[in-house]
Amino acid sequence: MFYLKNANKADIEKEYLFVRDIPADENGFINDYPNISRTDFDDALDTLIANSYGERLPDGYVPATTYFLWHDDDIVGEFQLRQHLCDSLIEGAGHIGYYISPEYRGKGYATEGLKLIIEEAKKTIPEDEIYLRVRKSNPASLKVMQKNGGYIHHENDESYFVRIKKEQK
């Protein structure tokens, strides 16, 4: 069974092991905590949780909630949901960023996770569409977005900018 859980202290050991192993930049998903020590992760987790309340945000950032995608008792992915857009997000990362651990790729986990985070986004974001960006070098992720109702709104040399309508017809 797939489900999302907000970053939380109760699952800190599994969250730590998962976050520690995410590269700093994996196909555009930025991890601020690659190879972090367990001791330092305590404060990092506090920061991730605070960010969801609009606290401890770097200048220019918007509130963002970190969710972990679980499959049964294992974390298989991480999703970032930015609660609204600012100018840099409109032509940048958009509302949602996600990472699926390599051993779970190609099995439909990203499609299921994106479906779940879209439902969260519909409750949270004020915009009429959910904004995402995907590198052109990552066609699998583009397919995941399209399976979830995404369409290419525009593109540049490096990326496709995808939109998903909050209300599907």
Image: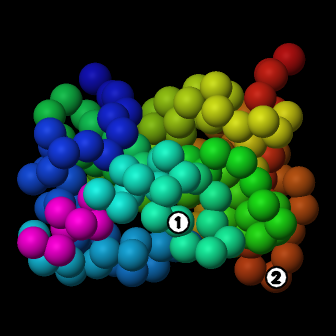
Q: Residue at x 77, y 29 (%)?
A: 166
The dominant secondary structure in magenta is: helix
Instruction: Residue 75 in the image: state x and y as whole percent.
Output: 23, 45
Q: Who is closer to the viewer here, 38 or 153? A: 38
Examine the structure image and report whether residue 43 is included in the region drawn in magenta. Answer: yes
Q: Earlier in the sequence, mark 2 or mark 1?
A: 1
**Residue 118 rendering spot, x and y as whole percentages:** 60, 34
State whether residue 22 is above or below residue 102: below
Q: Residue furthest right?
A: 154
The residue stretch that appears in magenta? 39-45
The answer to which image quadrant residue 97 occupies is: bottom right
Q: State which quarter of the image contains the N terminus.
A: top left
Looking at the image, can residue 160 be seen?
Answer: no
Residue type (three-letter) at the residue carrying disc 2: Asp
Identify the residue shown where x is 19% and y is 45%.
9
Q: Examine the rendering and report whether any part of residue 35 can be seen.
A: yes
Magenta span has 63?
no
Q: Quadrant of the C terminus?
A: top right
Establish if 73 lies above or below 96: above
Numbered tag placed on residue 157 in the rendering: 2
What residue is rendered at 50% in x and 30% in y?
116
